[in-house]
Image (cartoon, helix red, strand yellow):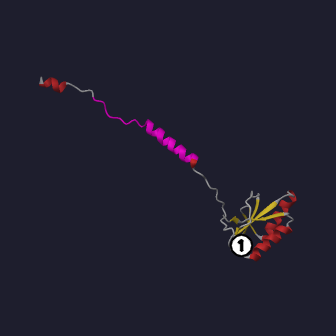
């Protein structure tokens, strides 16, 4: 009888973890975070704009002249000298009579440098010039 007990085999089922539902939950969480996450576009050139109480927010045009803290001039993220800026803006004004230029100057740039760039813009015959500022909330 003792030998019968030893020979009796139990049919044991091994314990398993069903991860299908866990994968579904992880996928839903991933989908939730992807949908609810906001992506902020940060420009390549960091400029600390001055603030203005009377400024209005508007659409930025495609021709942007930027002056960083060091006084380096950029036209649409391309570094130029004053004369190079004049040549490029003259081309823009000839091809597009309604072209407008947005001037983004760091608040630490000297007033004289800003006036110099505004003179270059006017000399190029661009009719519309907008100075970009941060709006005070």
Q: Residue at x 72, y 76 (%)?
A: 110
Residue 66: percent from left, percent from top = 73, 66
Residue 128, quarter of picture: bottom right
Tag 1's secondary structure? loop
Q: Residue at x 58, y 46 (%)?
A: 35
Which of the two residues, 71 or 37, is positioned nearer the viewer here?
37
Q: Quick one: which residue is furthest to the left in this view?
A: 1
Quarter of the image with the N terminus in it:
top left
Residue 102, quarter of picture: bottom right
Residue 63, quarter of picture: bottom right
Residue 8: percent from left, percent from top = 20, 24
Inspect the magenta stretch and tell me whether residue 19 lies in it. yes
Q: For the image shown, how many numbered marks are present on the structure?
A: 1
Which of the two residues, 29 or 73, is positioned nearer the viewer here?
29
Left or right, 17 with respect to 102, comes to: left
Magenta stretch, residue numbers: 12-35
The residue beneath circle 1 is 71
Quarter of the image with the C terminus in it:
bottom right
Left or right, 111 with respect to 20, comes to: right
Residue 48: percent from left, percent from top = 66, 68
Left or right, 112 with respect to 39, comes to: right
Answer few, some or many: residues within 10 Å of disc 1's Cα (few below 14, many 20 plus, some between 14 and 19).
Answer: some
User: Which secondary structure type mostly characterizes the magenta part of the structure?
Assistant: helix
Residue 69: percent from left, percent from top = 68, 72
Q: Residue at x 44, y 39 (%)?
A: 22
Which of the two residues, 82 or 46, is positioned nearer the viewer here?
46
């Amino acid at each position: 009888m003792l030998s019968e007990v030893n020979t009796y085999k139990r049919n044991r089922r091994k314990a398993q973890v069903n991860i299908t539902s866990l994968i579904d939950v992880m996928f839903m969480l991933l989908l939730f975070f992807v949908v609810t996450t906001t992506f902020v576009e940060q420009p390549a050139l960091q400029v600390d704009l001055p603030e203005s109480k009377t400024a209005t927010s508007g659409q930025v045009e495609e021709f942007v002249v930027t002056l960083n803290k060091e006084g380096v001039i950029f036209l649409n993220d391309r570094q130029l000298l004053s004369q190079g800026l004049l040549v490029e803006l003259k081309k823009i004004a000839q091809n597009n009579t309604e072209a407008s230029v947005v001037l983004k100057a760091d608040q630490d740039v000297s007033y004289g440098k800003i006036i110099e760039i505004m003179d270059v813009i006017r000399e190029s015959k661009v009719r519309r010039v907008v100075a970009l500022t941060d709006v005070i909330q």
